[in-house]
Amino acid sequence: MLRVGTHNVHGLVSHLLPLVEGWLRLRLDIVLLQETWVTFFQAAKVCRQIDAACREVDPRHEGFQVFWGYNTAGNAARSAGVAVLVRRALVASGQVVVQQQQVVATPQGRLVVLPVQWGGHAFRVVSAYLPNSSTDQQAFVNDCMRAHLQGQGHLVCAGDFNFVEDSALDQVSTAQHVGPST
């Protein structure tokens, strides 16, 4: 079994240890992250911090291989950012193979797509972080997601889609949560 989870971390570094504790407690093999707020220049250090936190929680855990989608747009100071973490032991053993040359990440830090092979299956793992406004969401889905996700094969797609069907049921209901448009 391959255990996959998704998590809007709202800033990865600021509370890394409790996040890692949760992922390891759930025994996740792949973790799809949104709102990492990690820049290209921080990535190597953050990877080391993730692995160190994994070893602190469980000395036998080898950590995660991280595939980043950075926000490289002009406002990249501290916004967006997605990532897919794959348990390093699965990659090292060949149980999970990531086609690294085919990984796609958008420059706005809102989408990362990993072609993966596992257990005789080929599929794409997608971490998405959609914009807040309905108009921007539609544009993102139509222009960006459609371009990167079309084609053959199965998808495992998760993330923060920034809308709910019934805002009254949302734990944090704000004016930004707009129902999907038709």
Image: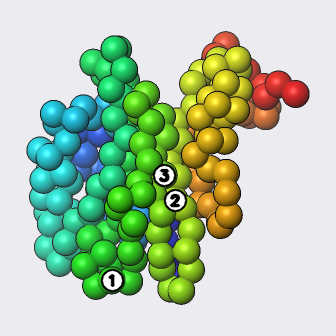
Give the mark nearer the N terminus: 1 vs 3. Answer: 1
Q: Which residue is drawn at 44% across and 36% down?
A: 106
* In-image side of 45 versus 74 (left or right): left
Instruction: Report helix, strand or loop for mark 1.
Output: loop
Residue 5 visible in the displayed image = no
**Badge 1 amino acid:** Gly
Residues under numbered marks 3 and 2 in contact, where contact means CB atoms less than 8 Å apart:
yes
**Left or right: residue 62 compared with residue 157:** left
Which image quadrant: the C terminus?
Answer: top right
Q: Residue 113 carries which label?
A: 3
Q: Residue sitting at 22 percent across and 35 percent down? A: 40
Give yes or no for contact between labels 2 and 1 (Cβ–Cβ under 8 Å): no
Gap in angstroms between the C-alphas marked 3 and 2: 6 Å
Residue at position x 67%, y 13% from top?
175
- Look at mark 2 in the image and give the residue it sits on: 125
Residue 7, relative to residue 151: is it above or below? Answer: above
